[in-house]
Every structure is written in C-alpha cells, then in structure tokens.
Amino acid sequence: MGHFQRKLSHLPRVASAVSISIYLLLALYGFSPALAAEELYLDGPPRIGLADGTYLPMQAFRLKGARTVWINKDYFRARGIDVDTKAGQAKLNRLMEKEFGYLVPNKSVPKNLLSSESKTFYPDGYGGPGLNGNYGGARAASVADYQLKGLGPTTMLGAFADADHSSGGVGAAQAMAEAIWSVILNRESPDGSNQVVALLDTGLYEPLAKGISQPRFLVVREDPLRPAHFIANPSKKDEARTAIDAKRVSENLDRLKNGKVINADLTKPGAADEMLSTFADRVSAQWAYMHANLIHHGAVSPSNIDIRGPVLDLSSVSTLPGAMPAMAHDPLPFGDIKTVEKYLLKPFYDAIQESGQIPLSIDLETLQKKAEDAYNMHYRHELLRIAGMPDETAVTAADGPAGRQLVKLLDELRTTGYGERLKTKAAVPEIKGTFDSMAIIRLLGKAPGKAPDARALNKLLKGATPEEAARLSKEITAKFGAFYEELFEDGALRGMSQSAMEEAIARRTADLARDRKALRRNIMSYLKKGVGAIGSRVGFYDMQAGIDKVIEQNTMREHLTRRRQPAFRSVPS
C-alpha cells in the first residue's frame, strides 16, 4: 500500500529520514485505509535533486483561518486519493490546510492571525532573463514535492522587485487563472503543465493598485525543475549573493552531469547533446500546440518551463486576439519560434556550454535549427489536427503536399491583419486580426465532402476587397477539398468509409476549432464572478464547483489522447 509521508523539516535530506506512515495520517485526518494512495511528500527539504545551496530556508507560521477552496481532482485521482465523495474531499481539504496554510509575517499580515506553530520552507534560487531583480522565487517556496506560492516575501526577493513580488501575495484572480489553465494545458498539451494541486483562501486581501484589493490566496503546485536552476542570476549588485549564486550554478550543473537531477548520465559523450535536443523538441512541441490553438503563454523565460517539458507560471496565459496585461516575450503565434529560442533555449545552452563542466559538442546554431524544424513539424501537425486530421493519419497527411498547402493557407489567413499592434496601455496590447481561421475551419469541417456555403464563407472574409475575397474563397475551397480527399484515401486504405471519415472530421473540427476568444471571455467572466463572491466573505461560495465547471466547459476532448511520456524522470533526493 502507498502512504502519505511528511519528511520532518528539521532532518537532513537523507534516504533514512523519518516518515509518518499512512496509519498515523489516517488517524490525524480520517482517511479511509481502503485508499491505495500514492506516496505524497508534504514536508521537509525539496526532493527534486538540486543542490542544498539552491535554497535559502525560511520560517513561515500557521495561518489560523486558511481554508481550502479548490483541489485539482485530476491530480489526486491519478494518485489514488478519494476526491469524488464529500467526505473524501473534505478530508483532503483539511490536509491541504494543515500542510500549506502558512504565511510569512510582515506588515500586511496581522500578528493575531498567525499561530506560534512554524514550518520550514525553501525558496529556490535561479537565474536567466525576466526576474525583475529577484534572486529566484520571490513569493514562492518549495517543501518536499510541492511549492507554495503567495506565502509572503521570501529570502530570494530583490531590493527593487515589482509590486506583485514585493508584497509576497497572490490575488484570487491570478490564482484561479493559474489553476484553470494548469488543468486545461495538462489535459491538452503534448507535455502537460506544472499542476496547481490546491488553492487556499487566506481570509486576507491583496492590494492590486491604489485603493483596489482582491482576496489573497495561496497556490499549491508541483515543485518545478527549471532550466533557470542551472543559469546564473543576472543581478550582480550584492557581491555575497553573487558568490552564493555562482556556487549554486556550479553545484547544480555538477549534479545534472552526474545523473542526480534527471535520469541521464551526461558524462558520456553525446549525452548532453541528446538531452538538449530532447529539451528543444519538447519546448517546440509545447509552443507549437499553444500557437496553433491561439493560446498566449505571456511570460516565456527559462524559469517558466520544467526541464521535463511541462509549462508553468500560467496566470498570464490568455487567448488571442487580446491578452492579459503581463510582461511577455511571446512572438506572434504564427510560425515563429525565434523569440522562444532567445529567451528560453539559448540561456540554458549558454549556461552549460560556458561552464565547461558538462561535455558538449553541439553548437547553438545546430540546436536552434533542430528546434525550428521540430517546431514547424509540430505546428503543422497541430494545425491539421484542428482542421480535422485524425491522429492515425498524422504522418502521411501532415507531410503530404495537400497538408502543407493547407497549413500555408491557414497561416496566411491568420497573419493577414495581425501585423499591427494596437497602441494601448497594456503591457501586452491587443492584436488586431481580420480573418477568423478557427471559424473558417469549423465551417469547412461541417461537411468535408462538399463545397462550403458560399454566403457563410464570404461573411467570414469580411474586410477583404471583393477581389481578395474571391481569391481566398477559391483557395479555401480548393485546398481544404484536396486535404480532405487525402484523408478519405488514407481512411480507405485503413478500411474506413468516406462517411465515417466525414463524421470524424466534423466531430474533431467542432471540438478543436472552437472559439478560443469565447474561452477567454468565459474564464474572465468566471474570475470576475468568483472574486466578487469570495471577496464579499459573506456566506459560502462553492469555488470548487465553479472552477471545475469552467475547466470542463473549455477542455477540448479531442486533445485528451495526445499526451507524451515525460522527456526525463527526476531523481528524488
């Protein structure tokens, strides 16, 4: 039988550390012994294999009024934990409050709300671009297999941090957005997401601007293994911190080389080249999926992806046109990965290459070319999946002439009108587009064996000159038709009738080409409603049901079979 384990925080990170067995925790929290639960490590030093020097431990104190308002049922179900009965969910809620209901005392946290009971948390140091002068996790700290975000200013906070990080808190809207997107992207994207496993309401308020505040939440998520853990911090203002940071980088690269972080021995010739090439493929697949689906990550940096593939820090995720105000390095999502390479792939490569600690023979240009080739392949496959291509025909259809021509046309439809960024005060201005490629795919996918409704298609080409609309209408009809003919032929070779293939295409396009703008409006509308309801602190608001409903409404079911195995396995300490 599996068991919950609380590695006690005062013990060193050793294999023989004392643990509390499932029977003690069952007694503490009332779980049924019938649960075949996977091990959950909830207390003690981080277990992702990084050097001790990565962390500057700190104490946080139990918050008397913390309340669990949402748990990730996908995550806990996969680990054999009961979340489908009221009793099981209530018990898990209490466990989350017990283990993660902690804050760092400061001027925004009244002392009378904190008890004298403390727990050690471990803020992680890391480097790379986009840190705003911080030395790592400025408002997040790790513990065992998890990370708590919003517990207060940490030991990694820089002297000139932005308001979000210097306060150390997380507002309810940001927390809920991260939770919603973590489940959707974990279900749909090729390599998943760093999962938010629970949200806790602190009962406090987080200031957003002068005179404006939101309920303050705690976000419990999986402890990420970032490329940034192996990259030097750009801040050099404090000599002592710079020396600590250099030691962190050297020790972590040494552990990475010797297979103590991931299950790869990088001392062997060519092993590091293979590891970086695999990482480049995973990055390319993730951003190809997001760009093809018109999803905007909003904060691309080596600290916002896991070395094993999952994306993280998802509170800035949005859909196009339009994006939430956030610092962003994303390129326009129409076939360009060069900015992702610049802010994510290159810093990781440079850290390994410049250290000289790990044997490396591949050059940056070759690695970037691999990433671009992989991106173009994944993007082409993803866009054609949205256009109705079944997974079974991916290799033949996506690489055939009709498939390539259709992708070229869809890129033209997406690019036209998207070159102009509107002048707004938002850090990520809205992008003005002319043609709705998803609506065009839905229209053609309704009856893939027939010509599209000419009036409906012309309506979708509104804004084009009559000559341009006529040309595009002709090309759309011809190129979708040729692509569908290839699918029919491939299906026939597999014993699938044309009518069955038409039904499969119609089902897939209706699901995958749904209006992502509606998804964004749906999420934003819910966040406004949810924040308002919980912010009043009057009565009981069922945030669990509300968030779960938004997730279910916006999950693309045809994406659920696409998950790949992790690129690497971590080596727990």
Image (cartoon, helix red, strand yellow):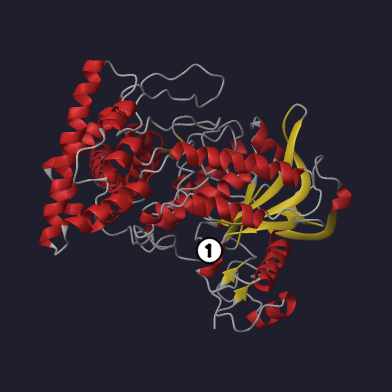
Q: Compared with residue 295, is residue 66 higher up or lower down, i.e. above or below? A: below
Q: How many marks?
A: 1
Kindly indicate the quadrant of the structure image that contains residue 97. Answer: bottom right
Q: Compared with residue 460, is residue 372 higher up or lower down, i.e. above or below? A: below
Say which quadrant the N terminus sits in: bottom right
Mark 1 Cα-neighbour bin, 10 Å: few <14, some 14–19, many ≥20:
some
The percent position of residue 394, horizontal first and vertical second, equals 21, 53
Q: Is residue 491 left or right of residue 440?
A: left
The percent position of residue 20, horizontal first and vertical second, equals 66, 77
Residue that badge 1 annotates: 75
What amino acid type is highlighted by mark number 1? Tyr
The percent position of residue 38, horizontal first and vertical second, equals 53, 74
Residue 170 visible in the current orientation: no
The percent position of residue 443, horizontal first and vertical second, equals 30, 39
Write the residue at 61% across / 47% down.
Answer: 176
Q: Compared with residue 374, is residue 410 higher up or lower down, i.e. above or below? A: above
Kindly indicate the quadrant of the structure image that contains residue 69. Answer: bottom right
Q: Is residue 31 left or right of residue 104?
A: left
Query: In front here: 31 or 455?
Result: 455
SS for callout 1: helix
Write the residue at 35% across / 62% down.
Answer: 565
Residue 420 visible in the current orientation: yes
Q: Compared with residue 452, is residue 248 higher up or lower down, i.e. above or below? A: below
Write the residue at 23% across / 40% down.
Answer: 366
